[in-house]
């Protein structure tokens, strides 16, 4: 996707602070962190959101989750973290390339959502 900001990060056309990379996924620091640890994990392949995943995407989705603990620990949140995947309009997704937020400590990140 030529106009996708996260595809451009994968292609090296715009810079990012990379913290993990393999053949399928890339992780980099969020440019506007909400917590001391705030990493985005993305598939290198363009997938718009969780609403558009295909069956063939299952392995890369699993890898994104399976690497989260190691990334969080390496980045300074060894005692847990939160994963967030905002999806579509209702999920307030801003960047239309699937990404998993890892937010973490050292202190607890706080309550999940304000209850209705
Ligand atoms: P979301 O609302 O889930 O789509 O989150 C998008 C996230 O991408 C936000 O937390 C932004 O701060 C982050 N972001 C946007 N542009 C960049 C960039 N060039 N490098 C790193 N993070 C970015
Ligand atoms: Zn993309």
Image: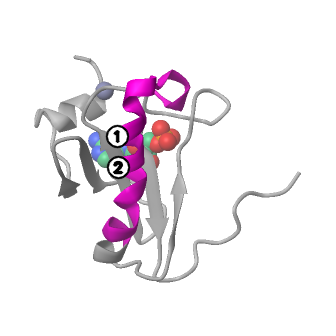
Residue on which disc 2 sits: 63
Circle 1 residue: 60
Q: Residue furthest left?
A: 12
Tell me the residue at 18%/52% (across/down).
21
Callout 2: CB less than 8 Å from ligand 2: no
Q: In this view, does 6 lie to the left or right of 81?
A: left
Query: Is residue 49 rendered to the left or right of residue 42?
Result: right
Residue 83 is a magenta residue: no
Residue interval drawn in magenta: 48-72
Q: Where is residue 40 in the image (x, y as percent from the top left)?
A: 36, 51
Q: How crowded is mark 2: few (under 14 residues within 10 Å), some or many (20 or more)?
A: some
Find out whether the residues at labels 1 and 2 contact each other: C-beta distance under 8 Å: yes
Magenta span includes 53: yes
For residue 1, above or below residue 23:
above
User: In this picture, is 96 found above or below 15?
Assistant: above
SS label for mark 2: helix
Q: Is residue 51 something one can see in this rendering?
A: yes
């Amino acid at each position: 996707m030529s106009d996708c900001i996260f595809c451009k990060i994968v292609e090296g056309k715009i810079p990012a602070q990379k913290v993990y990379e393999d053949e399928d996924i890339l992780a980099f620091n969020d440019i506007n962190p909400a917590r001391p640890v705030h990493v985005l994990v993305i598939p290198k392949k363009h997938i718009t959101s969780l609403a558009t995943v295909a069956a063939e995407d299952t392995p890369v989705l699993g890898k994104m989750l399976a690497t989260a603990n190691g990334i969080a620990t390496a980045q300074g949140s060894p005692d847990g973290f939160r994963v967030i995947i905002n999806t579509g309009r209702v999920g307030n997704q801003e960047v239309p390339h699937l990404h998993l937020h890892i937010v973490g400590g050292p202190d607890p990140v706080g309550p999940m959502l304000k209850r209705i």
